[in-house]
Every structure is written in structure tokens, then in C-alpha cells.
Image: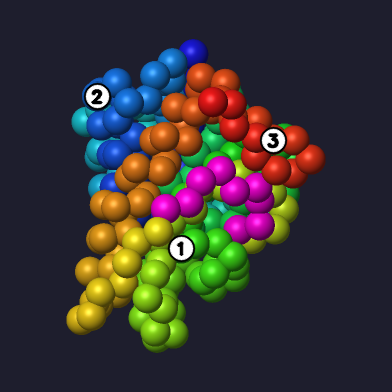
Amino acid sequence: MLRIVVLVSGGGTNLQAIIDSMAAGKITNTEIVGVISNNKTVKSLERAKNAGIPAVSVSPKDFENRDIFNDALLDAVNEFKPDLVVLAGFLVAIPPKMVAQYSNRIINIHPSLIPSFCGVGYYGLKVHERVLERGAKVTGATVHFVNEGMDEGPIISQKAVCVEDGDTPEVLQRRVMEQAEWILLPQAIDDIANGRISVVENKVVKKI
């Protein structure tokens, strides 16, 4: 049984997609052992509690500096003893110590087709704003392992989504979620839980 802890910052729609996929049998051999948010008042914590999942908040506002917060965040993750850390809309840079301790055991969902519209400054709605500003015709989402770089870890899967005339950042964000994020992230978790994915020489290898 794969023990996963999900890290979230906002409303938790990707968390809900994971919970729903587990209930529907689309994710197997997996248990969500905890949810951690850097915000105390977000809906994602409510979603976790409604599903009977332990949920805690570790806010940088409660600590004197970022180093102390980073240590507290890692301690909170370690408390749940996860096999896999899932970043589901977590808008906090992952501490290097966590990346090292959970090497090839942290995955992230990013709302673009990496290497486009990613890296420093590209998160949340800002990604979709930049896509529309650039006039891109296709966008999408990417699931990848997390390494020391920003959105630079080995790519697990991607799915393209068309940009349509008249799109606003909010409309495009919703379409990318529905057509890509909520599909890719549960599938990646199921693949990892059932041994269909491994990392070899910084590349993802999938077993059929």
C-alpha cells in the first residue's frame, strides 16, 4: 500500500480529484495518510476532513524565518511517514533537505506543457495569463518528479489542451484542470503505486 501525503495551498481541486479517483477505483493500492497546507483557512483542509483524512496547516507566518518554516514543513511531512509526497497546487518552494530526503518520491502537477510557461514566477493563474498574453494555441498540464530545480524534474506525463477564442485566464485554468490535471495526477499516482514507473538516469521509465 502506497502511503501518500498531499501538499496543497488553495481550494484543493486536485486533492479532490485524487480522493474521487480512489473512491472510483481508478487509483489502487494507495492510502492518503495526510494533507498539509501552508494556509490555515483554505477549502482543501475542509475537503480532507470531509474525507476522514488527517489535515494540518504549517504556515510560514508562524515562524521567525524561512529556514525554521522549512524544517517545520519537513517535520510535518515526516510525521505521516509517506512513501510519496504529492504536490497538488502547493505554491511553496520545496526545501532542499526535503528534496534530498525524498529523492524521486515527490511529484508535482504543473498547469502547462513543460518546458513552456514554467519556472520562477509561473504558478497558479499566472501561468494561464502568460499563455494568453503569448497567444499560444495549445497549453496543457505536466506531472513530473521534483528535483532541486524549479519545474525541472523528470517528466512523468503530459496532456495537451486547446486554447479557445475568448478564453479568460479563469476559463482556461478550469479547462486545463478538467481536461488534463484531474486526469494526469491520479494516473501518475496509480502508476507509481503499482510499480509501473521508475526513474533511471534522471528519466522516467514506464512499464507496460
Left or right, 39 with reference to 168: right
Q: Which residues are magenta?
A: 151-159
Crowding at dot 1, Cα within 10 Å, few <14 / some 14-19 / many 20+, comes out as: many
- For the C terminus, the quadrant is top right
- Name which of mark 1 and mark 3 comes first in the sequence: 1
Crowding at dot 3, Cα within 10 Å, few <14 / some 14-19 / many 20+, comes out as: some
Callouts 1 and 3 close, C-beta under 8 Å = no
Kind of element beneath mark 1: loop
Left or right, 123 with reference to 47: right
Dot label at residue 199:
3
Query: Is any atom of residue 89 visible in this view?
Result: no
Magenta highlight on residue 188? no
- Name which of mark 2 and mark 1 comes first in the sequence: 2
Location of residue 196 by image quarter: top right
Q: Please, what is the three-letter code of the amino acid marked with disc 1?
A: Ser
- Nearest the viewer among 5 and 199 is 199
Residue at 30% over, 39% down: 17
Disc 1 target residue:
112
- Name which of mark 2 and mark 3 comes first in the sequence: 2
Magenta highlight on residue 157? yes
Between the residue at mark 2 and the residue at mark 3, the CA separation in whole angstroms equals 28 Å
Between the residue at mark 1 and the residue at mark 3, the CA separation in whole angstroms equals 22 Å
Give percent across and percent down for residue 25: 29, 21
